[in-house]
Image (cartoon, rainbow, N blue to C red):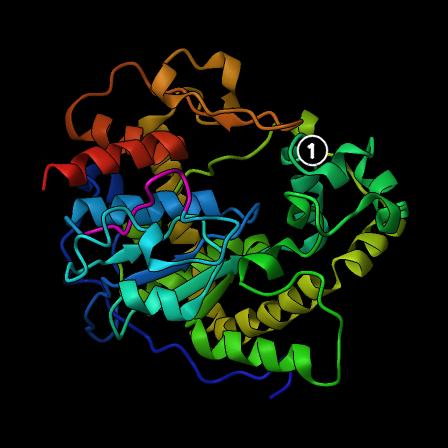
Amino acid sequence: MNDNNWEGPVPYFDYSSRVKVLPHFVLGRYGTSLGLACTPKKHVMFLKTHKTASSTILNILYRYGEARNLMFALPSVDHLGYPQRFKAEFVKDFARNRDKEYHILCNHMRFYLPEVKKVMPNGTFYFSIVRDPVQLAESSFAYYHGVSPAFQKAASLAEFVSRAGSYYKSWEPNSHYARNLMWFDFGYDNNMEDSPGLISALLDYLEMTFDLVLVAEYFDESLLLLRDALCWDLEDVAYFKLNARTNASVSALNASVAEKVREWNWLDWRLYRRFNASLWRRVASYGHERMQQDLARLRELRRRLADLCLQGGTPVASQQISVAGLKPIDSGKAKILGYVLRANLSGDALDLCQQMVFPEHRHLGHLRKKQALH
């Protein structure tokens, strides 16, 4: 198999018979689709890669699972042993509850399939997300400038990639943030050298392991493919973008710097190319006309939710958010956007809107408390 091979189409599913979670006045006619009936998947493993819009995916999974009283395999801290490779024991209380049925495993980890299989049952749907390594590196430099020694030595990403070989020391703590971060998150050696056929073989293995890999640059298209594969409703994948940065903390990169970033992160570039290609084969199977129609429906649903939930309808800088529980946490050089909710919300609408804008750490704490009661 080469980097662009595709294993088959995603079937066309129906969501019309499903119970709705969002209020009817929000959904209107945008909550259902037509086609053949299927059974929604409830066992899901999401490899949450860094700086790939994965916090937004996490929020979707949290809301879906909580609405249906599904059991999350939660970490004892804010991640599942990262940057160590995942072990089942990193799941909170796993050692005392080995027979417990877990439905969703989705927090940050470094992937290791044998240990994941100890937690998640056969038939679990595995998915992840990738991002253009150039944009990912720019984001990582902002977020992790204070924790990665390689980044700390450089004033800018352009300066770092111009002398990466001298700044970067693989043995230093948190060095993985500075090179092939996605490859590392998928469980591989981010400093490995190429040998004939090795990287393609590892990519083949990932394609066999993961049922779907989303692409951050085509987020809405990816969500529709995910919804289709999971047999979920459209409202199940409605979202507001979380953990995004203010425009002022995003740096523009010229073509020369971008090329150096790709060369330095060549494993991530191979990974991205493989799954970007597979995404578009899946889009073709989904149907371009159907995709355009469903994109319009998803975006109209998001517009309705913004009208319902958000003061001003758009994200704002954290200092403009007065509710402490909804204020995001800045990281490194990155200034994080959050949301101000409308003042007149109450009841189910307030619960829905709060959950859609919960910062990741707040949402995790909420789920921990809820599951502790069961």
Local crowd size for mark 1, using a 10 Å CA cut-off: few (<14), some (14–19), many (≥20): many
Front residue of 19 and 356:
356
Residue 358 seen in the current view:
no
Taking the magenta stretch, the answer to whether it contains residue 75 is: yes
Q: Which x, y percent locates residue 161? A: 84, 47
Residue at the extreme bottom = 1
Q: Give the position of the C terminus as an image quadrant.
A: top left
Magenta-colored span? 71-79
- Picture quadrant of residue 113: bottom left
What amino acid type should be assigned to the residue bearing mark 1? His
Q: Position of residue 88 (x, y in %)?
A: 33, 58
- Residue 152, located in which quarter of the rendered image? top right
Number of numbered discs: 1
Does 197 appear above or below 93?
A: below
Q: Is residue 81 above or below residue 4?
A: above
- Residue 67 visible: yes
The residue drawn where x is 68% and y is 46% is 175
Q: Residue at x 23, y 25 (%)?
A: 350
Q: Residue furthest left?
A: 374
SS at mark 1 in the image? loop
Residue carrying label 1: 145
Question: Horizontal placement of 345 versus 127: left or right?
Answer: left
Q: Does residue 47 sit above or below 231 in this rendering? A: above
x and y percentages locating residue 213 in the rendered image: 49, 65
Q: Main secondary structure of the magenta part?
A: loop
Left or right relative to 264: residue 53 = left
Residue found 43% across the figure and 24% down from its top: 339
**Is 235 part of what is drawn in magenta?**
no
Q: Quadrant of the N terminus?
A: bottom right
Give coordinates of residue 156: x percent, y percent.
Answer: 81, 34
Which of the two residues, 161 or 343, is positioned nearer the viewer here? 161
